[in-house]
Image (cartoon, rainbow, N blue to C red):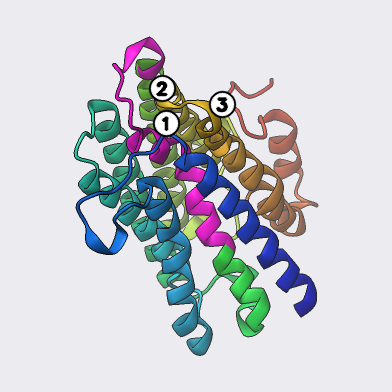
């Protein structure tokens, strides 16, 4: 198991290096700061998430806690884009908007997840992983790659050496981001309020946005990152275009790896014999918001 984890870590690092190399094409070069003089701004900022995750992996492993994983992830996003904004003397309006979008999203989601895990006490999915050094290191390494791959397109646009007008594609991207963010916030709020009611203990939510999608929060998340990618797209060139994998990465992560699949397994175990849940599954879209079937 440790051998497989070690191989996985190497693969994750190779993917990260590839994305940093691609995103650095067309990035401005830092000239006024001695310690990083001559380096591409994208490379500097793109490494922040990995570095922070490795630093905070150490106390988290020692304490055998997962309380700070999501918080460090969100903080990494914020530090990454703010660093890019500060170090880019020619940051344009597109870059400022992208920076604001990511900071708002990361702050809101980070506080929400941190508060949730403090209330729940732990993430049961990580009970075994956090006691195994290589498995836990792989998780934290993936967390660093998660920041880089997800924010990559926006970061590439923020560090681009060729500022452009936002244009119609950019405004469509902004609209998508606003819509996706609102959906995610509303879905999380509705579920939090549902869980607060003692009458709903042990029940599943099927009201509000959750009557239109089994996972509306994930739909909002995927949508807002597609919006950022669209806003970033006109400012990207050649190998920078590889960073447009951002929304695809988010989609695959949430639908195939850590999101929907795991939650559906848990729901299946809890309510598989519940006729109301089976009816809800049959009537309700898995991801995309759409009216329930009659």
Taking the spot 41% from the left edge, 71% from the top edge, the residue there is: 118
The residue that mark 1 highlights is 228
Q: Mark 3 falls on what kind of element?
A: loop
Magenta span covers which residues? 142-170
Spot occupied by residue 47 in the image (x, y as percentages of width and height): 44, 58
Measuring 52% from the left and 55% from the top, which residue is drawn there?
200
Label 2 to label 3: alpha-carbon separation: 19 Å
In the image, residue 156 lies in the stretch drawn in magenta: yes
Residue labelled with disc 2: 173
Q: Disc 1 to disc 2, how far (Cα)?
A: 6 Å
Which quarter of the rendered picture does the N terminus lie within?
A: bottom right
Q: Is residue 64 above or below residue 40?
A: below
Q: For mark 3, does the 10 Å Cα neighbourhood hold few (<14), some (14 to 19), or many (20 or more) residues?
A: some
- Can the viewer see residue 10? yes
**Vertical placement of residue 157 versus 149, above or below:** above
| 255 horizontally vs 23: left or right | right
| Residue 122 among magenta residues | no
Height in image: 155 above or below 273?
Answer: above
Tell me the mark number nearer the camera, choosing from 2 and 3: 2
Disc assigned to residue 289: 3
């Amino acid at each position: 198991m440790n051998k497989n984890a070690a191989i996985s870590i190497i693969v994750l690092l190779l993917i990260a290096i590839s994305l940093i190399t691609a995103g650095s094409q067309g990035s401005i070069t830092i000239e006024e700061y001695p310690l990083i003089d001559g380096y591409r701004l994208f490379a500097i900022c793109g490494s922040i998430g990995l570095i922070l995750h490795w630093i905070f992996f150490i106390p988290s492993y020692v304490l055998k806690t997962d309380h700070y994983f999501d918080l460090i992830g969100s903080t990494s996003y914020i530090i990454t884009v703010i660093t890019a904004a500060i170090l880019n003397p020619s940051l344009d309006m597109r870059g400022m908007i992208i920076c604001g979008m990511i900071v708002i999203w990361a702050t809101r989601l980070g506080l929400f997840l941190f508060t949730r895990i403090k209330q729940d006490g732990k993430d049961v999915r990580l009970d075994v992983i956090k006691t195994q050094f290589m498995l836990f290191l792989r998780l934290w390494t993936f967390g660093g790659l998660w920041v880089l791959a997800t924010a990559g397109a926006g970061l590439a646009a923020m560090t681009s050496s060729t500022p452009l007008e936002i244009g119609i594609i950019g405004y469509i991207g902004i609209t998508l981001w606003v819509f996706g963010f609102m959906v995610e916030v509303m879905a999380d709020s509705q579920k939090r309020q549902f869980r607060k009611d003692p009458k709903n203990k042990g029940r599943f939510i099927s009201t509000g946005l959750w009557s239109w999608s089994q996972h509306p929060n994930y739909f909002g998340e995927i949508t807002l990152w597609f919006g950022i990618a669209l806003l970033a797209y006109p400012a990207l060139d050649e190998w920078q275009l590889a960073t447009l994998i951002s929304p695809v990465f988010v989609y695959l992560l949430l639908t195939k790896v850590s999101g929907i699949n795991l939650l559906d397994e848990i729901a299946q175990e809890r309510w598989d014999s519940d006729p109301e849940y089976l009816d809800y599954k049959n009537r309700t879209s898995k991801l995309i918001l759409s009216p329930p079937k009659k």
